[in-house]
Image: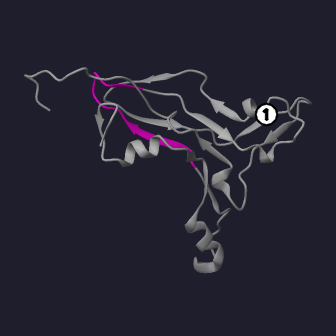
Amino acid sequence: MIANGIEDNGCGLFMLNRDLPIFMNCPHCKLSKNGKDPPNVKICGTISQLQRIFMVTPPFPIVLGTHPVIQFEELGLPPAVPERQQKLQFTFGCLVVLPPESFLTLRLPFVYGLQLEDGSLHPLNPLQHQPEATAWIIGGSTLQILSKPGCLDEGSQT
């Protein structure tokens, strides 16, 4: 498949163009809670959290940028909060240009929360029964193509 002039086997662009959940049920943790691990192994929870995205950027002239937007569901927020939708989005605030031919790690926050109008802090915790519906990276915001080659030189080989 070719999308935006860059070849892909279908999996990478599909994953980048869909909403990626921040929280998910951890199948190993659920099995461990059911008593299948030795008694000296302690599992603290059954929900895993996306904290890092590893990227390898292509060589120049392809230039990529990132501007991930993390969106939280409104369920865990008190109804009296003004501008609910804006306060539940987390972002860098600008597009970050990624260096060509690099291995990069995008580190996501470990704890999410917001400050209410009375000054108190309100944590944004995952839903216990459906954590993948709590928060997600909006599709298409993680990686963006900023420039690509117009045409290949006839003398160059790839």
* Residue 43 on image: x %, y %: 64, 66
Residue at 78% x, 47% y is 75
Which residue is tagged 1?
Answer: 84
* Residue 83 on image: x %, y %: 80, 29
Tell me how many marks there are.
1
Residue at 82% x, 42% y is 77
Residue at 53% x, 28% y is 67
Say left or right for 138 vs 88: left
Residue 104: quarter of image: top left
Query: Magenta part of the protein: which range?
Result: 50-64
Looking at the picture, tell me which residue is in the foreground, 139 or 40: 139
Quadrant containing the C terminus in the rendered view: top left
Residue 58: quarter of image: top left
Q: Is residue 54 magenta?
A: yes
Quadrant containing the N terminus in the rendered view: top left
Task: Report the amino acid beneath label 1.
Answer: Arg
Looking at the picture, tell me which residue is in the foreground, 78 or 31: 78
Say left or right for 44 vs 145: right
Q: Is residue 51 magenta?
A: yes
Residue at 49% x, 35% y is 140
**30 vs 38: above or below:** above
Pick out the residue farthest to the left: 155
Secondary element type, mark 1: helix
Q: Residues within 10 Å of mark 1 (few under 14, many from 20)?
A: some
* Residue 46 on image: x %, y %: 65, 63
Looking at the picture, tell me which residue is in the foreground, 74 or 46: 74
**129 vs 153: above or below:** below
